Amino acid sequence: MVDPRMVTDPVEPPYASSNSALRRILAEAWDHLWPWSRSGFQQQRALQAAGLALAMAASVVWVLAAMGHLNAGAIIGWWFGWSVFEILIRLGSKPYVKEGPWWGKHYRHANLMDMICYVGFKNLLIGAVLFLGLKSAGLLIV
């Protein structure tokens, strides 16, 4: 028997119904990298504006890191701060997570723990790729 507390309403992002695999993959990549939505901008203007400013600041931090002007601790701190903020943004803008295998098309509403896990794991992978890329290029002060 299924626990009714564990069942959540299904959600369908705008790109999920596309029949083109390439279009859906590109849209999903954009969805992972860009936490804001049009409806989210309308609902949370102050939080969204602060988020855009923080996103620009985080981008500047990665550029400074690539130029060799920041140490690893500063980069990790910025990335953690961005992740916490992204959780808040996504809960208001894109409050869904994928249900089932990564290649599937099933989504559901996310609760706080779902979003913490999703953003944490996604940003851990992105941060690791960026960190290792800077380190292997000799641009990171450790």
Image (cartoon, rainbow, N blue to C red):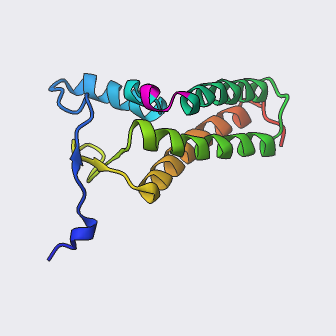
Residue 125 in the image, given as x and y percentages of width and height: 54, 44
Residue extending farthest to the bottom is 1
Q: Quadrant of residue 78?
A: top right
Which one is nearer the viewer's eye here, 72 or 110? 110
Quarter of the figure with the C terminus: top right
Residue numbers of the magenta segment: 41-45
Majority SS type along the magenta span? helix
Report if residue 42 lies within the magenta region: yes
**On screen, residue 6 above or below 100:** below
Q: Residue at x 34, y 32 (%)?
A: 28
Quarter of the figure with the N terminus: bottom left
Q: Residue at x 43, y 35 (%)?
A: 32
Residue 17 in the image, given as x and y percentages of width and height: 17, 31
Q: How many marks?
A: 0
Residue 9 left/right relative to 90: left
Residue 60 left/right relative to 42: right
Q: Residue at x 45, y 56 (%)?
A: 112
Residue 5 in the image, given as x and y percentages of width and height: 27, 69
